[in-house]
Amino acid sequence: MNKIRVAVNGYGVIGKRVADAVRLQSDMELVGVSDVVSDYRIKVADTLGIPVYAVNGEAERAMSDSGLTVSGHLHDLLDNVDVVLDCTPKGIGAANFEHYREHGVRVVLQGGESHDVTGHSFVANVNYDSLKGLDSTRVVSCNTTATVRTLAALKNVGLLGKARGVLFRRATDPWESDHSGIMNTVVPEARIPSHQGPDAQTVIPDLDVVTMAAKGSHTQNHAHFWTVELTRPTDESEILDAFRAMPRIAFVRHAEGVVASNSVIELMRDLGRPRGDMYEVALWEDILTVRGHELFYTYSVDNQAIVIPETIDAVRALMGTSTAADSIRLTDASLGVMDDFTRAPS
């Protein structure tokens, strides 16, 4: 079988991780990456032997002047791939969309873009098959991905009534900590619901969900706190079984010293994850509480990594080369995805 030829446009926080993940897939070939920058970020791609393309002539001159080997322009790259993964900053992907379609390539945008650009939003465990016959999709944001995974797990077993979530967001990406972000304050989003709830409804339209969000003065990981009205009384064991059945949710425990987002980050480093990345939702098993019809739980989200497996699965879904179960299995195996971070599989 011929490998799926993939391009990554935008070699930043998400793009470099997506590029690495593509290179791990036995059925995909990373043809090249493109960008406008000529600094250390794109030079890493050159060092790793990844073909580098310039978005335009101006970018090519800057790259060449900085010592980079430039393989061509973005339009040259697009002529030689099946799928482009746009990982550019918010708004640029939407502006690029028609250019991609003119080249006849399938397109995966990231969650910073509006659902209206593609008319389809994607979380692999929920609506993989709905991409059949389509040529583009949008992988929803990190917070929305986590929201959809956990609420879909409850919905799948008929326990989800309505959900109310509070999100405590990181202020900026870690690499921008020297020049961006906030200090000594918490900034609430200006409206309720925050955008994550309505965004989750683009994937599961019948969700009864409301989210509130605030931005805090930290740069790594988001924290979510959920109150869910269940369809019937149950206990913690049934809820935990529902979460275990959903790929890409992994348990951590306060009693084992995983007490905050910094503990989660350190745990990923100790496990040897590239860049300390966490592709799973890290859900606190021993904080989760059920009281009759009400469920309370909390988890940590790696804003830089959680969407990486979804992006890889979106490639196969658009190309129609794999079932949902097989794609998720292949992706998770290649990335070392776990269902519990401190206990061996039973």
Image (cartoon, rainbow, N blue to C red):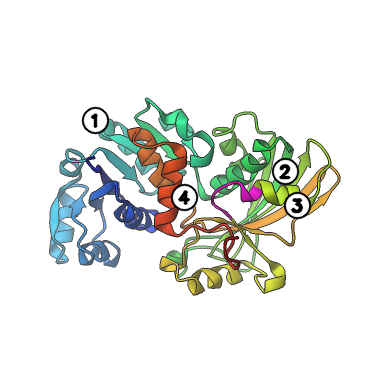
What quarter of the picture does the C terminus occupy? bottom right
Is 78 left, or right, of 321 in this rendering? left
Answer whether residue 24 is visible to the viewer in this image.
yes
Most extreme residue toward the top is: 133
Q: Which stretch appears magenta?
A: 243-249
Residue at mark 4 to residue at mark 1: CA–CA distance? 25 Å
Residue at mark 3 to residue at mark 1: CA–CA distance? 49 Å
Residue at mark 3 to residue at mark 4: CA–CA distance? 28 Å
Task: Please tell me whether mark 2 sits on a helix, a strand or a loop.
Answer: strand
Q: Estimate the x, y position of residue 112 in percent, counting from the top left.
A: 46, 44
Is 160 left, or right, of 291 in this rendering? left
User: Which residue is tagged 2?
Assistant: 164
Answer whether residue 226 is visible to the viewer in this image.
no
User: Which residue is tagged 4?
Assistant: 307
Above or below 154: residue 221: below
Q: Residue at x 30, y 34 (%)?
A: 106
Most extreme residue toward the front is: 346
Three-letter code, disc 4:
Val
Three-letter code, disc 1:
Gly
Query: Who is closer to the viewer here, 71 or 176?
Result: 71
Residue at mark 1 to residue at mark 2: CA–CA distance? 41 Å
User: Which residue is tagged 3?
Assistant: 237
